[in-house]
Amino acid sequence: MSAPYSLKVVLFGPESTGKTTLAGQLAAHYQTVWVPEFSRFYQEQKGAGCNLEDVIPIAEGQLQWEAEASVRASRLLICDTDILETKVYSQIYNGTCPPWLLRMVQGNPGDLYLLTDIDLPWVPDGIRDRPHQREEIYRQFKAELEERNLPFATISGDSAARLQKAIRAVDEFLKKE
């Protein structure tokens, strides 16, 4: 199925780095829809920590939400994470990743990743659990993008600065399309 949007912009990075806020702001700015993080919904419904057996249902849910949102999207589909984020977290939490997810990641890349920096304060919320590993986890996210040679821009600063940097990155990418 071909998606009606032309560019999938993915907010990507460690927990508590402003991805959800920025996804909503970008969707409003570009007058499009955004896809929430399915993993958060899944974990809240489960009421317990996730493990390796949860990785595939989380990835399937994220893909389903993206497909559903894509029919309502304008030129852009904004995603508050994607299955590549699920892959990175599977490796962080489980030390491995299911082969199915590795195959699915290959066929579902974002067009532009906005890597959210760890310069915002970490805020506990009942799901977030690694405040002392932020630098290490950030490096893993960045390395994943670099190893896959995926286009990305690093987004840092306060909320207003992040939004402006993200808009500039998306606008620059749109000029190339």
Image: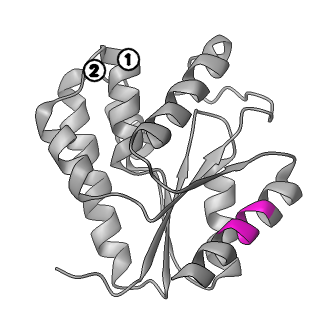
Give the structural element (helix, strand or loop) at label 1. Answer: helix
Q: Which x, y percent locates residue 142? A: 55, 35
The part of the image, by quadrant, that contains residue 92 is: top left
Q: Residues within 10 Å of mark 2 (few under 14, many from 20)?
A: few
Q: Is residue 114 left or right of residue 44?
A: right
Q: Which x, y percent locates residue 50? A: 32, 24
Above or below for 136 versus 157: above
Q: Which mark is residue 51?
A: 2
Judge whether residue 126 can be spotted in this image: no
Tell me the residue at 24%/50% (across/down).
106
Q: Quadrant of the N terminus?
A: bottom left
Q: Amino acid at mark 1?
A: Tyr
Q: Which x, y percent locates residue 101? A: 20, 40
Q: Is residue 135 left or right of residue 147?
A: right
Tell me the residue at 32%/54% (across/down).
62
Above or below for 25 versus 88: below
The part of the image, by quadrant, that contains residue 41 is: top left
Which residue was labeled with disc 1?
A: 93
Q: Are marks 1 and 2 in contact (CB under 8 Å)?
A: yes
Q: Which mark is residue 47?
A: none
Tell me the residue at 32%/32% (across/down).
46
Q: Nearer the viewer, mark 1 or mark 2?
A: 1
Q: Magenta segment range?
A: 165-169
User: Which of disc 2 and disc 1 is earlier in sequence?
Assistant: 2
Residue at the farthest left position: 100
Q: Which x, y percent locates residue 57? A: 20, 42
Q: Residues within 10 Å of mark 1 (few under 14, many from 20)?
A: few
Q: Main secondary structure of the magenta part?
A: helix
Give the structural element (helix, strand or loop) at label 2. Answer: loop
Q: Amino acid at mark 2?
A: Asn
Tell me the residue at 36%/38% (across/down).
86
What sort of colour scheme is used for the picture? one colour
